[in-house]
Image (cartoon, rainbow, N blue to C red):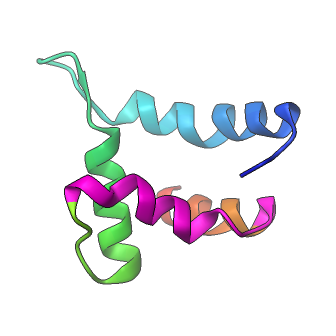
């Protein structure tokens, strides 16, 4: 995203950290963030991304957007 560290930290605190806290398998003590992002992309794009390409699809969807354009749809969909 090539954002300044201050903005990256704010995005982490307001978006990613809550996702990480809520996307956990408490019994196995494992992260389900990849599964969450895959489901998010499936709902958003109306097609299921390949498990090996989740990060690439997410990055291609948001890497060219300004910060507000990046945050607005995630906030609307997630919160």
Q: Main secondary structure of the magenta part?
A: helix
The x and y percentages for residue 74 are: 56, 61
Find out whether residue 62 is within the magenta segment. yes
For this orientation, the residue located farthest to the left is 27
Image point (78%, 59%), residue name: 67
For this orientation, the residue located farthest to the bottom is 46
Residue 72, placed above or below residue 47: above
Residue 55, placed above or below residue 5: below
* Span of residues in magenta: 51-68
Image point (65%, 34%), residue name: 12
Residue 72, placed above or below residue 13: below
The x and y percentages for residue 59 are: 53, 59
Compare residues 4 and 43 and report the one nearer the observer: 4
Q: Quadrant of residue 41?
A: bottom left
Image point (26%, 80%), residue name: 47
The x and y percentages for residue 68 are: 79, 63
Relative to 53, is 27 on the left or the right? left
Relative to 24, is 68 on the left or the right? right
The number of numbered badges drawn on the structure is: 0
Find out whether residue 32 is within the magenta segment. no
Q: Quadrant of residue 34?
A: top left
Relative to 63, is 56 on the left or the right? left
Image point (46%, 39%), residue name: 19
């Amino acid at each position: 995203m090539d954002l300044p560290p201050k903005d990256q930290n704010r995005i982490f605190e307001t978006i990613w950290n809550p996702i990480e806290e809520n996307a956990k398998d408490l019994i196995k003590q494992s992260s389900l963030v990849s599964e969450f992002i895959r489901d998010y992309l499936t709902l958003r794009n109306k097609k299921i991304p390949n498990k090996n390409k989740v990060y690439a699809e997410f990055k291609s969807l948001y890497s060219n957007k300004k910060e507000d354009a990046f945050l607005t749809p995630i906030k609307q969909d997630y919160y």
